[in-house]
Image: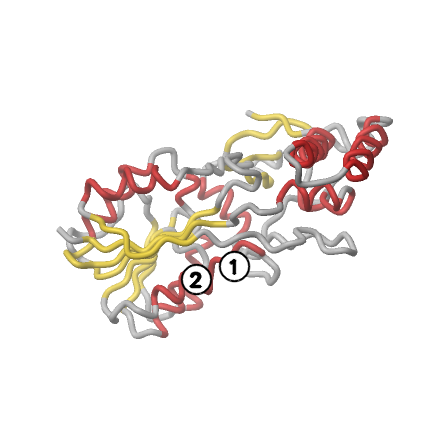
Amino acid sequence: MIHQHPLAYLLGLEGVALLRAFAGEHDEEFVAARLAEIRSLLEDAYELGAGGPATELTSAEAYGWWAGGYDAPGNQLIDIEGPIVRSLLDDVPAGVALDAACGTGRHAEYLAGLGHEVVGVDSSPEMLAVARTKVPAGRFVSGDLASLPLPDDGVDLVVCALALSHVPDLRPVFAEFARVLRPGGSLVVSDPRGRLGDIGLPIVVPGPDGGMGFLPNRSRLASEYLAAALPLGFEVRHCEEPMRPSPFVDPDGVPPGAAGAAPPLTPSGRPPNIWALHPLIPEAANAAYQGSPVAIVWRFQLTS
């Protein structure tokens, strides 16, 4: 169980912004503005709500809640990650393609359009239901990344998008990718980067019991993916870390959208929707998030 307090998040952003100023990225006027803003925020620590606890959810529970709105426009991460992944898929000959942790089937649909025979695996029945409507000819089954319900050497391509940040250990998942791939097959992986450097902020959504829950969202070093992939015979063909847009919050104080964001901020004791907080301190939010990657995207090839 974790405890989230809206003021704690805002003060954290202010602190990161001040550290960037201390490193020489901002001037005295910026520092003075941040200190004044912190004083104002502290005048009433509970004006934004008292925050509250959130219990850990499974991926199926969290993404089941998201299924109806996951594909809504304005998800900054998906808007940046999607075109990069698709450019890598364009270079792979048509064959049997596995979309692992397929979600709503956004990549499965693209793979089908390229002529692949598509298999999708996900732990969320609600997500699978959406994917089936997008790719009626595909085969979508319930399963776990660490135990894929597919035979050995059965696919030519594996895609796993924005899902590995939720697994505790990459090694068994990459071992499964290597098991189901044919020699010479391709693996395309995308994953979120920590919203603030190496801090993987959890995703907070309503839980099945009506309370608030969170899904861990790990931010990993590039070396961790390599340590999981290279011993299995994977070789790197591409690696890219796209950056967040600047400014992170536009001049009018409107934050980037986030499909499946938690309910709006209330003083009822529920954990905050952090995406609703950024417009309160746009300069600090922009400074805190500037120059940070939004994702990492890999293409591997299985050589043995």
Q: Nearer the viewer, residue 222 or 123?
A: 222
Q: Nearer the viewer, residue 296 or 170?
A: 296
Task: Name the residue type under label 1.
Answer: Ile
In the picture of the structure, the residue carrying the numbered disc 1 is: 80
Instruction: Tell me, yes or no, whether the two marked residues, 1 and 2, touch with CB atoms within 8 Å.
Output: yes
Q: Which residue is mark 2?
A: 84
Decide: is 75 above or below 200: below
- In space, the residues marked 1 and 2 are separated at their CA atoms by 7 Å
Element at badge 1? Answer: helix
Viewed as shown, does residue 121 lie left or right of 26? left
Task: Give me the residue at 33% from left, 44% from top.
Answer: 144
Q: Is residue 223 left or right of residue 273?
A: left
Give the total number of marks visible in the rendering: 2
Please indicate, yes or no, whether residue 188 appears anywhere in the rendered image. no
Q: Amino acid at mark 2?
A: Ile
Q: Position of residue 303 (x, y in %)?
A: 16, 53
